């Protein structure tokens, strides 16, 4: 049961990160950025969302134990 919850939560975080990255890439392209610049901004956003999720997980794990 716990493994399923962890896998589903991980999948949800990855999907949300990808959606945020796609949104940033689209907005960058609409603003006139080149494809490499938009891709760089999307990758930075993806990494930032994953980092925030990991930090929140660590904080919650410290509080819950």
Image: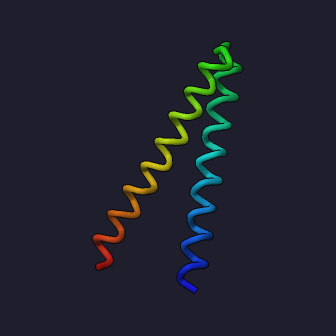
Task: Say which quadrant the N terminus sits in.
Answer: bottom right
Q: In the rendered image of this protein, does residue 63 appear above or below residue 1?
A: above
65 relative to 17 in the view: left or right? left
Task: Give the total of numbered labels.
Answer: 0
Q: Residue furthest bottom?
A: 1
- Residue drawn at x 51%, y 34% is 44
Where is residue 4? Give x, y as percent.
Answer: 61, 78
| Colour convention | rainbow
The relative height of residue 61 versus residue 30 in the rendered view (above or below) is: below
Q: Quadrant of the C terminus?
A: bottom left
Dividing the picture into quadrants, the one containing residue 25 is top right
**What is the quadrant of residue 58 in the picture?**
bottom left
Question: x, y percentage for residue 55?
Answer: 37, 55
Q: As drawn, is 49 to the left or to the right of 56? A: right
> Is residue 31 toward the left or the right of residue 13 in the image?
right
Residue drawn at (56%, 26%), measured in percent from left and top?
Answer: 40
Coordinates of residue 20 in the picture (x, y in percent): 61, 42
Residue located 66% across and 26% down the image: 27
Q: Is residue 46 above or below residue 40?
A: below
Q: Give residue 36's position: percent from left, percent from top.
A: 63, 19
Residue 64 position (above or below residue 49): below
Identify the residue at image location x=42%, y=56%.
Answer: 54
């Amino acid at each position: 049961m716990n493994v399923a919850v962890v896998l589903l939560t991980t999948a949800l975080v990855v999907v949300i990160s990808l959606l945020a990255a796609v949104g940033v890439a689209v907005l960058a392209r609409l603003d006139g950025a080149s494809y490499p610049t938009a891709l760089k901004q999307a990758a930075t956003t993806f990494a930032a969302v994953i980092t925030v999720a990991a930090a929140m997980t660590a904080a919650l794990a410290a509080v819950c134990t």
